[in-house]
Image: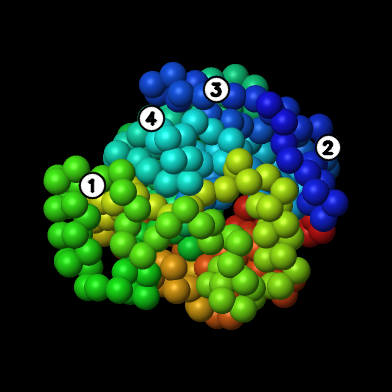
């Protein structure tokens, strides 16, 4: 099991790479990295969004290691270098988000807790943020605090094309009649990362977008196409759970949210509303950022890291 490198995206030094078994025995890929600068601050567990894979986060991993964090990262089931449940490897499919919950528990039990230094913290993006919020609301979370970057609490209307109730009805009905493994209407096997920079909704940074596209071209086995109807149904159900007004109030650990002001993938207002209901939480709006804040321009990333450092109590590290 190896990590893929390109000239503009080298593998960080000292990587420990392997697979662990998911809840059903499926092989899931992970990587761990020791901190490169003291004082040591524990382990930051890094969780990606839908379609993403470990290699896309090499720059973020280096940023965290310089701040004294060890880093542990995994590829979610169905994407990256992990097990894919369907013959068409480009389909992003899951039956229920509880599968991600159970895989997360295996990752923590078998990889992080035995081999990575405490305390344990989490940094999660988009779909990864949804999964981590599911964990934050459950008893016995492993994490002392979480940083959630554009978490998927509600999809942006521009992603749906129809009102939410109609989209839910579409996903539920199609799944019931045997179409759960079909692509959603309008999606296909084509990876979004191969779209042109001018058409992208992820980042305003041309250099990072180009780097990520080159990485996807160099490692086609890691990329993913559109979601299935089953994934959409599972995602909508998970988001509905998070949007229950009582859910946020059950969370006891500190959370920090970063909201992209120009996000058209997830709904920024839904993140603000969720944060306002927390016992211990704060949020930062980065007005000019698109959805992938961690892949944004140096200026936007600089503002992210300044707020992150203040929240984590990290002295200037870069």
> Which numbered disc flags the more N-terminal residue, 2 or 1?
2
**How far separated are the C-alphas under marks 2 and 4?**
30 Å
* Image x and y of residue 47, in percent: 54, 45
* Image x and y of residue 308, in percent: 63, 59
Q: Which mark is residue 20?
A: 3
Residue identified by numbered label 1: 179
* Image x and y of residue 65, in percent: 75, 44
Q: Is residue 298 visible?
A: yes
Horizontally, is 65 left or right of 155 in the view?
right
Q: Residues within 10 Å of mark 2 (few under 14, many from 20)?
A: few
> Which numbered disc flags the more N-terminal residue, 2 or 4?
2
- Where is the N terminus found, in terms of image quarters? top right
Query: Number of labelled discs?
Result: 4
Residue identified by numbered label 2: 13
Tag 1 secondary structure: loop
Tag 4 secondary structure: helix
Q: Nearer the viewer, residue 111 or 198?
A: 198
**How far separated are the C-alphas under marks 2 and 1?**
44 Å
Residue identified by numbered label 4: 102
> Which numbered disc flags the more N-terminal residue, 1 or 3?
3
Q: Nearer the viewer, mark 4 or mark 1?
A: 1
């Amino acid at each position: 099991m190896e990590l893929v490198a390109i000239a503009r995206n080298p593998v960080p030094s000292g990587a420990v790479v392997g697979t662990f078994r998911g809840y059903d025995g499926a092989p899931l890929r992970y990587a761990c990295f020791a901190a490169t600068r003291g004082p040591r601050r524990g382990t930051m567990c890094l969780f990606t969004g839908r379609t993403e894979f470990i290699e896309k986060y090499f720059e973020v991993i280096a940023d965290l290691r310089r701040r004294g964090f060890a880093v542990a990262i995994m590829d979610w089931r169905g994407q990256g270098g992990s097990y894919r449940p369907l013959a068409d490897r480009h389909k992003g499919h899951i039956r229920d988000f509880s599968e991600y919950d159970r895989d997360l528990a295996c990752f923590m039990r078998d990889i992080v807790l035995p081999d990575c230094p405490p305390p344990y913290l989490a940094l999660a993006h988009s779909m990864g943020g949804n999964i981590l919020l599911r964990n934050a609301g459950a008893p016995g979370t492993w994490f002392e605090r979480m940083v959630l970057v554009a978490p998927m609490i509600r999809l942006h209307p521009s992603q749906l094309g129809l009102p939410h109730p109609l989209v839910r009805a579409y996903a539920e009905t199609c799944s019931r009649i045997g179409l759960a493994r079909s692509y959603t209407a309008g999606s296909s096997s084509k990876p979004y990362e191969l779209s042109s920079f001018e058409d992208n909704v992820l980042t305003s940074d041309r250099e990072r977008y180009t780097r990520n596209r080159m990485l996807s071209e160099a490692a086609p086995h890691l990329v993913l196409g559109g979601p299935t109807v089953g994934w959409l149904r599972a995602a909508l159900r998970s988001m509905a759970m998070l949007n229950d007004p009582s859910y946020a109030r059950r969370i006891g650990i500190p959370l920090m949210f970063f909201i992209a002001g120009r996000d058209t993938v997830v709904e920024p207002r839904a993140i603000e509303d969720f944060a306002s209901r927390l016992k211990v939480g704060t949020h930062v709006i980065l007005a000019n950022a698109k959805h992938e804040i961690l892949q944004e321009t140096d200026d936007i990333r600089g503002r992210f890291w300044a707020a992150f450092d203040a929240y984590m109590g990290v002295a200037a590290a870069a």
